[in-house]
Image: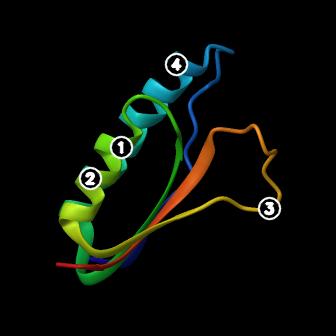
Amino acid sequence: MFNVILSDIAPATTGRKDVDAARSYELCSMALDISEKYLKKGGHFVCKIFQGNDFDNFQKKVKAKFRESKNFKPTSCRKNSKEIYIIAKFKH
């Protein structure tokens, strides 16, 4: 069991933002599933995701499993980048 699960996975990009976001969502969903199995109660989850049609749905799934969830976009990211991190604390 782990205290933190960090997913910085990104799909091989195609240049189509909708496809890339959908692939990112799938990878993040897999990481969230892994956190269900291997994250200690009270643990934390950090995941990089590309914002797209499924972003709100993924955010709701994270919020249902953790007491606190915030979005973070590093200053090093380009302003037009769809890449964002979800930081979730304190697994129920």
First along the sequence among labels 2 and 3: 2
Residue at the image position 64 percent from the left and 14 percent from the top: 14
User: Is residue 58 toward the left or the right of residue 13 in the image?
Assistant: left
Q: Secondary structure at mark 1?
A: helix
Q: CA distance from mark 3 to mark 4?
A: 23 Å
Task: Please state the horizontal and vertical placement of residue 45, each as a whole percent of the image.
Answer: 39, 68
Amino acid found under the numbered disc labelled 4: Asp
Q: Position of residue 48 (x, y in %)?
A: 54, 51
For the residues marked 3 and 1, what is the alpha-carbon distance in whole angstroms? 22 Å
Query: Which element is circle 2 on?
Result: helix
Q: Secondary structure at mark 4?
A: helix
Q: Quadrant of the C terminus?
A: bottom left
Q: CA distance from mark 2 to mark 3?
A: 25 Å
Quadrant, the N terminus: bottom left
Residue 10 bears which disc, if any?
none
Badge 4 vs badge 2, beta-carbon distance below 8 Å = no
- Residue picked out by circle 4: 18
Nearest the eye: 19 or 8: 19
Q: Earlier in the sequence, mark 3 or mark 1?
A: 1
Mark nearer the viewer, 1 or 4: 1
- Please say if the residues under marks 3 and 1 sit with CB atoms less than 8 Å apart: no
Name the image quarter holding residue 43: bottom left
Label 1, label 4: how many angstroms apart (C-alpha)?
14 Å
Q: Which residue is mark 2?
A: 60
User: Label 1, on which residue?
Assistant: 56
Which label is found at residue 75? 3
Q: Position of residue 62 (x, y in %)?
A: 29, 59
Q: Are marks 2 and 1 in contact (CB under 8 Å)?
A: yes
Looking at the picture, tell me which residue is in the foreground, 23 or 72.
72
| Amino acid type, residue under disc 1 in the picture | Asp
Gap in Å between the C-alphas at discs 4 and 2? Answer: 20 Å
